[in-house]
Amino acid sequence: MSVREKDNPVLFAKIQEQNLLRQYDLLSNCIEIGIEKGVESFDKYTLWTLNYAAVANIAQFGGRYREEPIYVGNHRPPHFNLVPNLMDRFFSVMHENWINPDHPTLLPAYALWRLNWIHPFVEGNGRTARAACYYLICLRAGRILSGRKIVPERIRENREPYYKALQAADQAWDEGQFDVTELAEYLGGLLKDQLSEEI
């Protein structure tokens, strides 16, 4: 059972907002488990669950990888046949580089960019990528971070710098480079703002 935006935009928006609240509740549980078990608990099942929560009742294929082409503005995500392998590689990068003492938002930035680039789901990729990014930020900190407004909410409020940083990472990738520095710095600023409002 699902509602389409074109059929009832008001109901669609209401369900989408309720899903977001449920996803944030679920995200807190996932973070607690991750803190207890380590970064290896960040796997496809975690992402599938977060995606399902984000798109419940607005998309019928939530919580599983896409099996059709998808188009996102000017970005053409990889063929759906490549998604499982790309996602396996994605998790491998996360797990193998976890102990790297670089900037605390570098791997979360990588996750945010790479999930948006792969676009592994039919719907809710951005919401799932932002949740995964925040999961990793909290895992790096070793706790659920406080603040009145968390990083994913801050991204939603002002998306222009977010899109700009994603495009910079895309451009670097198209040129044969890996560079998510702009995105990592952007996330660092949002995180600083969040923590400055600790309650």
Image (cartoon, helix red, strand yellow):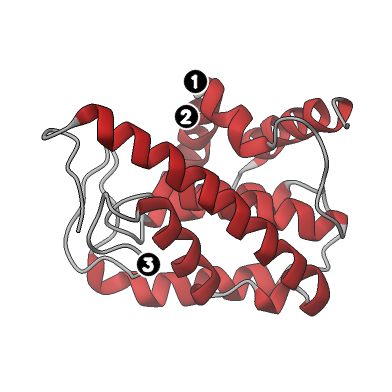
| Label 2 secondary element | helix
Spatial distance from mark 3 to mark 2, Cα to Cα?
Answer: 24 Å
Answer left or right for 4 relative to 143.
left
- Residue type at mark 3: give it: Gly
Answer left or right for 161 relative to 64.
right
Q: Looking at the image, is mark 3 or mark 1 earlier in the sequence?
A: 3
Identify whether 120 is placed above or below 34: above
Labels 3, 2: front one: 3
Badge number at residue 72: none
When asked about the image quadrant of residue 165, the answer is top right
Q: In the rendered image, which residue does mark 1 sit on? A: 160
Cβ atoms at labels 1 and 2 below 8 Å apart: yes
- Residue type at mark 1: give it: Glu
Badge number at residue 163: 2
Q: In the rendered image, which residue does mark 3 sit on? A: 63
For this rendering, which residue is in front, 108 or 176? Answer: 108
CA neighbours of label 2 inside 10 A, class few (<14), some (14 to 19), many (20+): some
